Amino acid sequence: MANTDIGIDLGTSNIRMTMGNKGVVLSEPSVIAYNTRTDRILAVGKEAYEMIGKNPEYIAVVKPISDGVISDDDLAHSMIREFILKVTGHQLLKPRIVICVPSFITEIESRAVVEAARSAGSRQVYLIQEPIAAMIGAGVNISKARGHMIVDIGGGTTDVAIVSMNGVVTSHSIKTAGNTIDRSIIKYIQNKYKLLIGERTAERVKIELCNLYDPSDETTVPVKGRSLLKGLPAQIDFSETELFEAIEDDTFAIMEAIRKVLEDAPPELVGDIYDNGLILTGGGSLLGGLTQLIKRTLGINCNIAKDAINCVAKGTGMAFDKTTTLLDGFEHAPVSQYK
């Protein structure tokens, strides 16, 4: 791997980059802020994220990636370019770039991702499917004729796949993930308490309070927002049980996605997965009680990968050493080279 090679995990909520042998060199929110009057880019990443909900009318704060794919080409190109300049020290070295994409991505969406990388000055662009990248980043040897199951819960999508012999045997993606869970929390609190909260507050509640296995009424956190009845600031105490009720449908949508992939898989590989268990990656894997819930619901052992949040980014960077193997090892090419 060359020192200028860049791996990009282009997430809906966060973008992570690896460079050469340095590992993850950038991890920031996938957010860009610009002046609508002058079209000038004001901030990207953490700086732009801090502006959400606090910006004046003439400053737009946008997430140009939605449900795992680019929703605004121009802004995504600008954001990726700014991040690449950050990690290369503002010297465009025409790097090779591997970008991670969801397994269900269309040809048009793939082209948008490739153009974004090209506009940032790359000389060669590869795409790698999320499940493959997550497996590599988790340290799993996927070259053998043995089934391994990955569940990658990101911000915009949950990708479930069974991998064997360097390729995806069966997979399924749903647009139920971290952001969907945040929206469910906002909606629940709004309906039950007539309290309006923002995305950042919902995310904090999710991280601090989530217990999917054995929720309690007694464990609570204070939640502040605006009363829809009075229009004034207000605070409530929100419990683990209420949080579970708010996100129960989303949680079991993820369970059903896992069940579907198991039902579609060859019996021999399902036997391997029963022995190996499944591996959880992505920010959503850290939801409290998720591993126990999966075991109770589906009867499968479940392990959270080491450094689960950065697994996909690490695997994307490590893919440079495996491009030939991955291209030859799976006929539908989980890594695609565009020349």
Image (cartoon, helix red, strand yellow):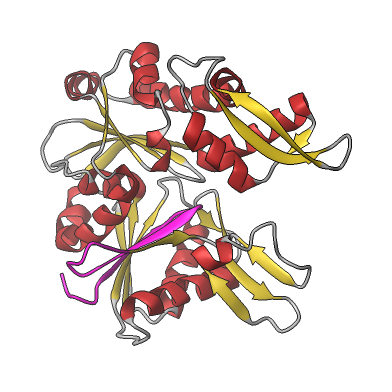
For the point 21% across and 48% down, which residue is it? 136
The residue positioned farthest toward the left in the image shown: 144
Choose between 131 and 190: the one closer to the eye: 190
Q: Residue at x 60, y 39 (%)?
A: 202
Q: Above or below — where is 85 with respect to 263?
A: below
Please name whichever residue, 102 or 139, is drawn nearer the observer in this view of the structure.
139
Q: Position of residue 25 (x, y in %)?
A: 30, 66
Split into 4 quadrants, where in the image is the C terminus?
Answer: bottom left
- Quarter location, residue 228: top right
Q: In the image, 86: left or right of 201?
A: left
| Residue 117 in picture, x, y percent from top left | 41, 72
Quadrant in which the N terminus appears: bottom left
- What segment carries the magenta color? 1-25
Asked whether the viewer can see residue 23, the reply is yes
**In the drawing, does residue 161 fall left or right of residue 223?**
left
Q: Is residue 160 above or below residue 334?
A: above
Residue drawn at (59%, 47%) of the image: 200
Q: Is residue 22 magenta?
A: yes
Q: Is residue 64 above or below residue 83?
A: above
Can the viewer see residue 337 in this picture?
no
User: Residue 215: image x %, image y %?
Assistant: 49, 16
Q: Horizontal placement of 232 versus 76: left or right?
A: right
